[in-house]
């Protein structure tokens, strides 16, 4: 493990991306921050700018209007940057996969490193997914 | 000098990715424009390809926070089309789920509003008290969000009698913190100074822009679908419509806070009704939907949700029109934001009920030099929080 | 309750082509598309109804525009129906009378391609920037 990865593992800064979501996954991601679940005990902090982010938490199916912007968001993030797809829509498109405005699930647009399925996944599941992602970093 | 500030489309202030362009003259907002479409998933088209029963699940996924309001409105519309009267027990179940949802949605808003003006304690507290309601949902419906409790003809599953004590316990545990927060908010001189007179939506503007829900009720327009057109159990229980006259952000907060108590009252009475109708039928068998059209609406936490369905007698709708409350509340920014300073915009935009879902950055474009200056999304929140701090410091100095 | 409905009926008078009362809470009025501005103004301003939304439907006979108004005090939804021929999908805009109708008319143009004559701000609302002109997803012939 090099110094950079070691540093990354100690304090992951996450940025929240939502595109065409029903909001539920977003709320559950935020719920992870609140006293009951408290994601900050794993050193994770939600940041307001993608340029500070180590991990993108992505929710929702990608709409045609949002797709180029999601791509740009990913390009702007400092690398290494890990992408976590949260919820059924982000993983596969779910019920919206036949829509005329559907551009694809996240892995069609940007590389995805972890999938957390569920509609919406419980905060416990999001925490478990995040911790599993951390354990794969070598 | 005129400055145009786009907010979004990915910005922490907003419920969905939307692009707001604020035109500024110095620090004062002179125009607001909105570009929607980042979140457009084509649900109306998908609804035409799914069967009547499948649609209730699709409709739930319009919005995660109103995930029972849309199915209730949709089922109202289909039942209006087919002329179905739902069983009494189903009415109570619908109202209980609907009102519990309102409680958790209002607490969520309260927390976020607190965050935007720099009261992070309120943010953490509001979300902490919301958790017992979500636990209750998990117990009685099986999921924290997306409850799938509503079905055409009644309810999809019963609320078991064994669950009734936990509903009562959850409600009684919720009242003391709600009372505490209401008193704290209504007596706090800083909140008064910060929120009163900010983002005023006048009564005539609310009517002109056809605003609904707490946004309209805070401007003195006493509309509430639950009262005006009683459906579910709302005609069978006692409760009041909360209105305020001022129309500012403070009034909107007061309306939402006081509505929480009304919701608690409604659920308590509905639980009594559940006990009375023990063992009764909770869903009617619906064979088919006859040709025709139906209209249903429901008072979601943010305002009236409207559904229109047209049937040709087949197993799926020919047309399904959905109108969510924010759709009509959004244009009212034109009336409430113009003339405000940029530090007040965050809370004014938030006052119709935002969510913390999308984040990007704000870019300030100087039209003369075409130079772009990027402000992070947090900057706007920071500006807003700074103003609160200044007011608080000023009040403290004044009292000494 | 009777008074408001009677006022609507009398005020619109000869403009009404068909009056259907499905039940006390749901009234459907059919009018010609030329009269839409006058009808909307009368119901919104004189009868003090709240404009809910506009529904556009692609039917075999033409495009149907349904303007839903709510009389909150009596809990009645009045729906004004107009039929627009497919050969000339145009209708007068009501957004100058009812600012709340601004968004929905832009949406109906996106979805069904019905032009609103005199709309103050006829830009695209919901579809993406690179969506081809002249393709409207809610039309029946959409792939």
Image: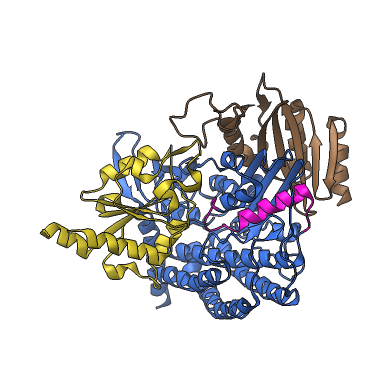
Displayed quadrant of residue C119: top right
Report whether residue B274 is seen.
yes
> What is the x, y in percent for residue B64?
52, 56
Answer with left or right where residue A34 lies relative to residue B306.
left
Task: Identify the residue at horizontal 76%, vertical 40% (top origin).
Answer: B291
- Foreground residue, A97 or B325? A97
Q: Which chain identifier belongs to the blue chain?
A: B
Q: Is residue A63 above or below residue B117?
A: above
Whether the magenta-drawn stretch holds residue B70 is answered as yes
Whether the magenta-drawn stretch holds residue C61 is answered as no
User: Most extreme residue toward the left, as rendered?
Assistant: A2
Task: Identify the residue at horizontal 65%, vertical 42% (top origin).
Answer: B320
User: Most extreme residue toward the top, as rendered?
Assistant: C87
> What is the x, y in percent for residue B196?
53, 62
Answer with left or right where residue B229 lies relative to residue B182.
right
Displayed quadrant of residue A28: bottom left
Answer with left or right where residue C110 lies relative to residue B276.
left
Q: In which quarter of the image is the C terminus of chain A?
A: bottom left
- Foreground residue, B336 or B170? B170
Segment colored magenta: B61-85
Q: Which chain identifier belongs to the yellow chain?
A: A
Answer with left or right where residue A51 lies relative to residue B183.
left
> What is the x, y in percent for residue B126?
48, 70
Report whether residue B364 is seen.
no
Q: Colour of chain C?
A: brown
Q: In this view, does C26 lie above or below B273?
A: above
> What is the x, y in percent for residue A132?
28, 62
Q: Is residue B339 above or below residue A26?
A: above
- Foreground residue, B129 or B90? B90
Task: Identify the residue at horizontal 61%, vertical 48% (top origin).
Answer: B55
Q: Quadrant of the N terminus of chain A?
A: bottom left
């Amino acid at each position: 493990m090099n110094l950079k990865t070691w540093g990354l593992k100690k304090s992951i800064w996450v940025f929240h991306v939502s595109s065409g979501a029903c909001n539920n996954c977003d709320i559950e991601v935020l719920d992870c921050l609140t006293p009951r679940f408290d994601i900050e005990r794993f050193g994770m902090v939600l940041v307001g700018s993608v340029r500070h982010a180590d991990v993108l938490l992505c929710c929702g199916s990608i709409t045609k209007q949002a797709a180029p912007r999601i791509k740009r968001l990913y390009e702007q993030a400092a690398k290494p940057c890990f992408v976590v797809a949260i919820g059924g829509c982000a993983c596969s498109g779910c019920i919206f996969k036949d829509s005329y405005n559907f551009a694809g699930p996240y892995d069609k647009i940007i590389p995805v490193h972890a999938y957390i399925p569920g509609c919406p996944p419980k905060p416990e599941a999001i925490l478990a997914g995040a911790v599993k992602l951390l354990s794969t970093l070598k | 000098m005129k400055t145009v500030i786009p907010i979004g489309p990915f910005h922490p202030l907003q419920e969905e990715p939307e692009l707001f362009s604020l035109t500024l003259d110095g620090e004062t907002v002179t125009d607001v424009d909105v570009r929607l479409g980042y979140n457009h998933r084509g649900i109306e088209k998908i609804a035409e390809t799914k069967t009547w029963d499948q649609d209730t699940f699709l409709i739930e996924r319009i919005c995660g926070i109103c995930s029972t309001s849309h199915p209730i409105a949709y089922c109202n519309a289909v039942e209006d089309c087919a002329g179905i009267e739902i069983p009494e027990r189903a009415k109570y179940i619908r109202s209980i789920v609907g009102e519990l949802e309102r409680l958790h949605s209002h607490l969520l808003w309260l927390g976020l509003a607190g965050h935007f003006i720099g009261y992070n304690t309120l943010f953490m507290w509001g979300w902490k008290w919301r958790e017992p309601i979500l636990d209750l949902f998990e117990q009685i419906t099986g999921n924290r969000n997306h409850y799938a409790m509503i079905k055409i003809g009644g309810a999809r599953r019963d609320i078991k009698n064994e669950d009734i004590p936990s509903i009562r316990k959850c409600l009684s545990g919720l009242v003391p913190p709600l009372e505490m927060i209401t008193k704290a908010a209504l007596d706090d001189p800083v909140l008064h100074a910060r929120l009163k007179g900010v983002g005023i939506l006048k009564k005539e503007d609310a009517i002109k822009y056809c605003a609904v829900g707490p946004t309209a009720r805070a401007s003195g327009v006493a509309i509430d679908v639950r009262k005006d057109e009683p459906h579910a159990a709302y005609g069978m229980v006692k409760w009041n419509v909360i209105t305020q006259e001022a129309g500012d952000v403070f009034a909107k907060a007061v309306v939402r806070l006081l509505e929480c108590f009304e919701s608690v009252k409604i659920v308590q009475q509905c639980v009594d009704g559940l006990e009375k109708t023990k063992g009764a039928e909770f869903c009617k068998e619906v064979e088919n939907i006859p040709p025709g059209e139906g209209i249903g609406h429901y008072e979601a936490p943010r305002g009236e949700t409207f559904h229109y369905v047209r049937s040709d007698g087949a197993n799926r709708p020919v047309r399904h029109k959905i109108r969510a409350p924010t759709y009509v509340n959004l244009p009212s920014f034109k009336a409430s934001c113009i003339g405000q300073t940029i530090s007040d915009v965050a809370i004014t935009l938030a006052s119709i009920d935002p969510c913390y879902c999308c984040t990007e950055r704000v870019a300030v474009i100087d039209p003369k030099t075409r130079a772009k200056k990027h402000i992070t999304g947090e900057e706007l929140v920071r500006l807003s929080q700074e103003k609160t701090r200044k007011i608080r410091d000023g009040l403290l100095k004044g009292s000494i | 309750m009777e008074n408001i409905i009677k006022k609507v009926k009398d005020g619109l008078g000869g403009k009404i082509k068909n009056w259907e009362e499905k039940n006390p809470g749901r009234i459907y009025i059919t009018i010609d598309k030329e009269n839409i501005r006058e009808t909307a103004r009368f119901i919104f301003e004189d009868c003090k109804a709240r404009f809910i939304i506009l529904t556009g439907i692609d039917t075999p006979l033409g495009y149907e525009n349904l303007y839903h108004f709510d009389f909150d005090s009596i809990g009645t939804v009045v729906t004004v129906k107009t039929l627009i021929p497919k050969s000339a999908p145009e209708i007068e805009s009501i957004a100058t009378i009812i600012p709340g109708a601004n968004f929905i008319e832009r949406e109906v143009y996106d979805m069904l391609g019905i032009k609103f004559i005199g709309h103050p701000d006829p830009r695209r609302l919901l579809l993406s920037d690179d969506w081809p002109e002249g393709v409207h997803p809610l039309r029946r012939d959409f792939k």
